[in-house]
Image: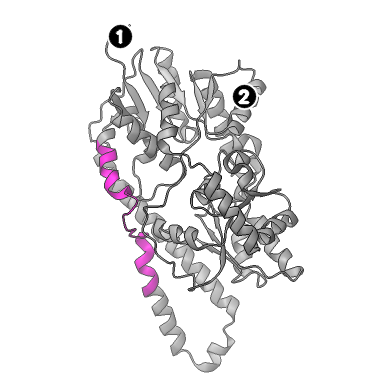
Amino acid sequence: MSTLPSVTWVDVSELIGWRGHLTGIQRVVYEYARRIVADPARDVRGFTFDFAIGDLVEVDIAGLLDAMSTEVAPAAAPTGPPSATLAPRMLALAKDVYDRLPADVRGRIRDRDIQRVLAAGRLAFRVADRTARIAQSARRRPAALPPDPQRATFLTGDTVLLMGRAWENPQGFDLIAARKTEEDFRLVTLIYDVVPLIHPEFFGPGLYERYANFVFEALDSSDVLPCISQSTERDLLAAARELNFEPPTTSVIELGDPQRSDVAREQPRFVDDGEPFILAIGSIEGRKNHQLLYQAWNLARERGIELPRLICVGSPGWLGNDVQYAVLNDPSVRGRMTLHHGVPDSEVAWLLEHCLFTVFPSVYEGWGLPIAESLAAGKACAASRSSSMPEVGGDLVEYFSPYSADELLAAVTSLLDADTRRAREERIAHDYQARSWEQSYSRLRALL
């Protein structure tokens, strides 16, 4: 048995090749990792799975976090995606070509033709952006993983902390599980949700099998499974029963609220001065349920209800192409519901500050950070009443069924009333208790 001082090993795979804007799981890993490293009671080391050699290797976690901290600082001005500088030049070129066309040709160009060209351009910019970001990641990788990386050796008494998407790397997880049979180290695996098992229809082929294997391995190998909500904990315990496991050791650790109070505000070019709008934050994918927003805005038109523009901010995700196509091509919502990808923090902060309120119709969430973000900004929110979302919003949120456009429209029209919205904001200011990352880490620290 090892007599060496125990080490806390942190999987930093999510931060290797980091691309400058932290969201979701990346943000969670970063917030916890930097607090663990700063903890004077711990000997902390980072590790990741190196695909080049097929093994777990050490990472200079302090150096990695130091390199990131100068760029993650909240007040830092965003540089935008690498492809952003292409857009003005390409649009100027397109306008120049259009202006040179004969008048009779310009007259035959319909609005939908222009929209299709713009859609193709946006796709090209996203491809260019993704390619440039991958290239940036490749250039950064050697700084985090030296040419001769050292094997990460977990000894008896150590603690290994997994906070990332271990289901995306079953080979690395299998190595950890195998080594646990050789050395009695402690394995702590953070569980965000088990949504792929509950709603496999919202994900592409293959994820259900990968995620089911991850949940099985996590239940079989982990000493403790912290969950980010009571809803996730219930789901995990139900999965354990279904897989014939003894009830695992779990604990609920609520995430810290997104804070944008120190972020510089910058008005997006796609919003006019003084324009009233409703804001939806979340990746454009099936589970986030933008289809319901699309239906509700069409339902309002059918009933003669005038709604402000709905601005949807989020990256493209699983099975989101259909709703993107519908919003782009349906004349009844064109200009009344708009989708925006790659919006920097400074502009999201401005949108939160100036929106009438926010809406979050997700079918299922492990936590529901956009709700917390809205309340932390003092803004009213209409949200789905499913899964963990009532845990986040309590009685401060206007809830609706994620399957009812009628209920969603009723919640939206309720918050459009200025007096109702003002009363809700006053309650939020008085009653909402923001969750800090320090509080969240103190709960994780107790488990470590």
Is residue 72 shown in magenta?
A: yes
Between disc 2 and disc 1, whose residue precedes? 1
Residue 318 shows in this picture: no
Percent coordinates x, y for residue 352 in the rendering: 49, 58
Q: Which residue is mark 2?
A: 237
What residue is at 27 percent from the left and 48 percent from the top?
70
Q: Nearer the viewer, residue 15 or 22?
A: 22
Q: Secondary structure at mark 2?
A: helix
Give SS at disc 1.
loop
Please state the horizontal and vertical placement of residue 419, each as a whole percent of the image. Answer: 64, 61
Pointer 1 residue = 2
Query: 168 or 334, which lies in front?
Result: 334
Q: Quadrant of the N terminus?
A: top left
Residue 126 seen in render: yes
Is 348 inside the magenta-drawn segment?
no
**Residue 12, image x, y percentages:** 36, 34
In the current view of this chain or complex, which residue is farthest to the bottom?
A: 103
